[in-house]
Amino acid sequence: MNYWPLLGIAIVVVGFALRFNPLLVVVGAAVATGVLAGLDPLAVIEALGKAFNDNRYISVTWIILPVIGLLERYGLQQRARAVIEGMRGATMGRLLVAYLAFRQITSALGMKDIGGHPQAVRPLVAPMAEAAAMKTHGELSGDERDKVKAMAAATDNVGLFFGEDIFFAIASILLIQGVFESAGYRLTPLQLSIWAIPTGICAFLIHGSRILAFDRRLGSVSR
């Protein structure tokens, strides 16, 4: 057995450890793996080019991220905090539970990229949750602020993870279908999606309870 192609893994590990350019590290590892596996160098480059062309929509990310960065620079987080401070009855718990429901429902409809950490949690959800917590419970310590931000990020993760499996045309459902089929159970993606609904509901109830309990714990701390 030829183990030389595994050298690509070592290139990735060393490159990231030395903080080299990630794109160059990944491309170098891919080329090294292909060549050591006996492929023609031109064939390796052609495969990389084809993969990039087939997934060129990924380059849209490089347009979105600078826009979000500019919005943050010119006060997006401050405006998000101001909106929450001006709302009556806004609490961190209610805000994050509402975002959890929004994230799960949109993911279940196939719109899994409508939220996310860089485009929604960091510039909007986390600052709004922090402002709501401060409005309800007063000034927060640095540790408490970090916990609020972490809860906002966790809410996005839970909403996406347990919402996207309800959408039948997604890779995770197709993977589950393949595993069941290899074991002799022939199920359609729609059947798997329907059985993901109770799990999604349980995830909403459990994580929603965790959010509200965390909000209450913040309020019980003496200032």
Image (cartoon, rainbow, N blue to C red):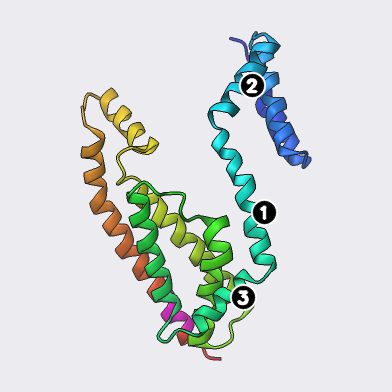
Residue under the point 53% across and 71% down: 148
Label 2 secondary element: helix
Residue to which mark 3 is pinned? 78
Find numbered disc 1 in the image and state the secondary structure of the residue it sits on: helix
Mark toward the viewer: 1 or 2: 1
Type of amino acid under label 1: Pro
Please say if 137 is above or below 180: below
- In the image shown, does 212 or 165 lie closer to the viewer? 165
Earlier in the chain: of badge 3 and badge 2, it is 2
What separation in Å lies between label 1 and label 3 (alpha carbons)?
Answer: 18 Å
| Residue 103, x across and y down, in percent | 39, 58
Front position among marks 3 and 2: 3
Check disc 2 and give the amino acid type. Answer: Leu
Give how far across and how far down residue 7 sits, in percent: 68, 22
In the rendered image, residue 97, in percent from the top left (x then y), is placed at 38, 69
Location of residue 60 by image quarter: top right
Which quarter of the rendered picture does the C terminus lie within? Answer: bottom right
Q: Residues within 10 Å of mark 1 (few under 14, many from 20)?
A: few
Identity, as a three-letter code, of the amino acid under mark 3: Gln
Is residue 65 found left or right of 95 in the rendered image? Answer: right
Q: What stretch is highlighted in magenta?
A: 214-218
Q: Which residue is rendered at x = 61% and y = 69% of the image?
A: 76
SS at mark 3 in the image: helix
Magenta segment, principal secondary structure?
helix
Question: What residue does disc 1 label?
Answer: 66
Of the numbered discs 1 and 2, the one sitting upstream in the chain is 2
